[in-house]
């Protein structure tokens, strides 16, 4: 599945579109940055409630295609600008982490 499909899912707001043609490998849920750094899949969608600049740094190191901020979490404007520069899509949703990941999985059968 391409990132473009995730960007237009209902209940998700695209804060940064990243590279819409990028292929998505799988969905990953984690709120511990140290674990995400070593286990988040390249080209993956990372669902988390960690909304700070370190989240973006970890996503960049892991080559994550998209961060989904669950439970209404957002990032500050400066971090969103950096995500745009790095081509990392950022989405926000009010859904809980598991439900947000499950809907993406069901949409693309990853």
Image (spheres, rainbow, N blue to C red):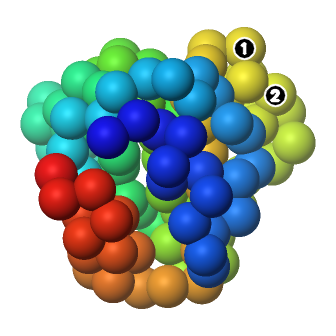
**Crowd class of label 2 (few under 14; some 14 to 19; many from 20; radius 10 Å):** some
From the top left corner, tell me how far across and down residue 31 is, in percent.
31, 60
Element type at mark 1? helix
Give the quarter of the figure containing the N terminus. top left
Q: Residue sitting at 55 percent across and 40 percent down?
A: 4
Q: Residues within 10 Å of mark 1 (few under 14, many from 20)?
A: few
Q: Residue at x 58, y 30 (%)?
A: 20
Nearer to us in this view, 56 or 95: 95
Residue 106 x %, y %? 25, 70
Residue under numbered circle 2: 81
Residue 57 appearing in the image: no
- Nearer to us in this view, 78 or 5: 5
Q: Which residue in the structure is indicated by mark 1?
A: 85
Distance between the alpha carbons at the discs numbered 1 and 2: 6 Å
Query: Which quarter of the picture shows residue 65?
Result: top left
Examine the rendering and report whether any part of residue 6 can be seen: yes
Q: On screen, 39 above or below 51?
A: above
- The structure residue drawn at horizontal position 20% and vertical position 44%, both measured from the top left corner, is 26
Horizontally, is 78 left or right of 71 in the view? right
Above or below: residue 83 compared with residue 63: below
Q: Is residue 60 left or right of residue 46?
A: right
Is there CB contact under 8 Å for labels 1 and 2?
A: yes
């Amino acid at each position: 599945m391409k990132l473009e499909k995730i960007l237009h899912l209902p209940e998700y707001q695209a804060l940064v579109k990243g590279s819409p043609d990028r292929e998505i490998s799988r969905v990953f849920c984690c709120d511990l940055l140290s674990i995400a750094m070593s286990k988040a899949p390249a080209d993956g969608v990372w669902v988390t409630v960690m909304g700070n600049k370190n989240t973006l740094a970890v996503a960049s190191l892991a080559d994550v295609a998209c961060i989904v901020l669950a439970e209404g979490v957002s990032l500050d404007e400066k971090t969103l600008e950096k995500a745009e520069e790095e081509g990392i899509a950022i989405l926000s949703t009010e859904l809980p982490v598991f439900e947000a990941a499950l809907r993406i999985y069901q949409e693309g059968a990853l």
